[in-house]
Image (tube, rainbow, N blue to C red):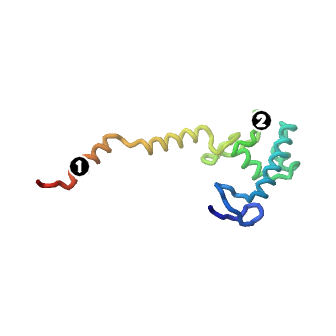
Amino acid sequence: MRISNCKGCGRIFNVLSDEQYCPNCQKKMDEKFDIVKRFVEDNPNVPVETVAKETDTSMKQINRWIREERLSFSPDSSYGIPCENCGRMIRTVRFCDECKTKLTNTLRSALDTPKSQDRQLWQQDDKNRMRYIK
């Protein structure tokens, strides 16, 4: 079990997984989220800046909830958040579809090793093995 300082109040608390806030601050954040969610449901086409102002919530926190897919934009909204890789405006999560595809392909190619290289390595290991003389 780890301990960490709460990002909200600064108090030390026991971290069970990846929490950044102590239980008290997390409860307050969940209550704030419920307020923002209700406001967005009641006013679906209101700009994000208005949501932040009316609910007394920071834009940074609203963007975090959007990246976590807890909040989303209406299809006709002009607001977006930047892709963390290329900066293109997107509606939710961290990466645009194009960057997701590139990252996926890069990871796949890094994990896929050619079979011929594996065979050559095994053959080299086989030649260098110690032999027992009877």
Q: CA distance from mark 1 to mark 2?
A: 62 Å
Q: Which sits in the foreground, 114 or 6?
A: 6
Q: Which of 35/50 is in front?
A: 35
Residue 71: % across, % down: 75, 42
Q: Nearer the viewer, mark 1 or mark 2?
A: 1
Q: Residue furthest top?
A: 75
The residue drawn where x is 80% and y is 47% is 33
- The amino acid type found where label 1 is placed reads Asp
Tell me the residue that label 2 is attached to. Answer: 74
Q: Quick one: which residue is furthest to the left in this view?
A: 134
Where in the figure is residue 132, as x and y percent of width and height?
16, 55
Q: SS of the residue at dot 1?
A: helix
Q: Position of residue 1 (x, y in %)?
A: 62, 61
Q: Is residue 54 left or right of residue 102?
A: right
Crowd rating for badge 2 (residues with CA inside 10 Å; few <14, some 14–19, many 20+): few
Q: On the image, numbered disc 1 is attached to which residue?
A: 126
- Foreground of the two, 105 or 65: 65
Q: Amino acid at mark 2?
A: Ser
What count of labels does the image hold? 2
Quadrant assignment for the C terminus: bottom left
Nearest to N terminus: mark 1 or mark 2: 2
Q: Secondary structure at mark 2?
A: loop
Q: Residue at x 79, y 58 (%)?
A: 24
Instruction: Give percent across and percent down for residue 112.
Output: 42, 41
Residue 111 relative to residue 4: left or right: left
Q: Residue at x 55, y 38 (%)?
A: 101
